[in-house]
Image (spheres, grey):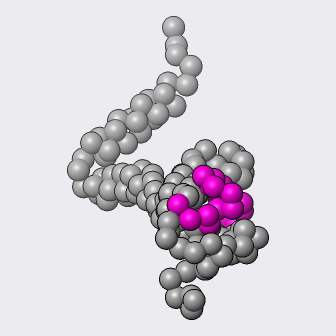
């Protein structure tokens, strides 16, 4: 019995043997392996570095905003002015760190108003961190959020209505 297309099979098998032998030889394969491995390792590493950079920027921003917002509310006697100053400061810091502006500060006071002598002011900050490249998939906020909290005491010996240590009596 005769096999169909014997020469075609023989040529295909011969080509596969030649290609297989060429791939087993070390000449020229090192460069290809290096390029493939470099791409396979460098792209995820670069993505990880970008993501960790975004998270670290948000951590620094949250810490600065919490500390300064608590201090602003502990020293400013006018609650409306304190709120406006801390909101403007938060927007400025978020912009400096390349993060989306938003309402990220929550203020809690032990006394009413916040700058009552002897009280404490607690500023809590929560910042959503965008993940590079996955924003449209995961939504604008991202899966990671960093937070910070700072407690600032109000000077116990400050006269009610004074704005700070430099006031003239």
Residue segment shown in magenta: 97-118
Instruction: Estimate the x, y position of residue 103 in percent, counting from the top left.
Output: 72, 60
Q: Is residue 91 above or below residue 150?
A: below
Residue pictured at 52% horizontal, 31% vertical: 8
Please say if 132 is above or below 166: above
* Furthest residue toward top: 1
Rendered position, 16 above or below 124 = above
Q: Is residue 141 left or right of residue 54?
A: right
Q: Residue furthest right?
A: 80
Looking at the image, which residue is at 24% across and 47% down? Answer: 25
Count of picture labels? 0
User: What residue appears at the point 66 percent right and 76 percent down from the top-left corner?
Assistant: 161
Q: Is residue 31 left or right of residue 148?
A: left
User: Percent position (x, y) of residue 5?
Assistant: 55, 25
Residue 17 seen in render = yes
Locate residue 108, reporting x and y percent.
63, 53
Residue 116 on the magenta span:
yes
Where's the C terminus, which quadrant? bottom right
Task: Give the prevailing secondary structure in the magenta stretch.
Answer: loop
Please indicate, yes or no, whether residue 61 appears anywhere in the rendered image: no
């Amino acid at each position: 019995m005769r096999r169909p297309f014997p020469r075609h099979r023989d040529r295909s098998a011969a080509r596969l043997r030649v290609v297989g032998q060429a791939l087993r030889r070390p000449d020229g394969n090192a460069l290809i392996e290096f390029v493939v491995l470099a791409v396979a390792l460098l792209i995820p590493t670069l993505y990880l570095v970008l993501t960790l950079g975004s998270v670290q920027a948000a951590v620094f921003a949250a810490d600065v905003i919490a500390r300064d917002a608590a201090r602003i509310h502990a020293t400013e006697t006018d609650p409306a002015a304190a709120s406006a100053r801390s909101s403007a400061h938060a927007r400025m810091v978020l912009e400096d760190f390349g993060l989306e502006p938003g309402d990220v500060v929550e203020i809690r006071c032990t006394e009413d108003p916040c700058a009552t002598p002897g009280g404490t002011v607690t500023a809590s900050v929560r910042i959503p961190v965008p993940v590079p490249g996955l924003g449209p998939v995961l939504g604008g906020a991202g899966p990671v959020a960093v937070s910070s909290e700072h407690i600032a005491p109000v000077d116990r010996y400050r006269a009610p209505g004074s704005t700070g240590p430099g006031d003239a009596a």
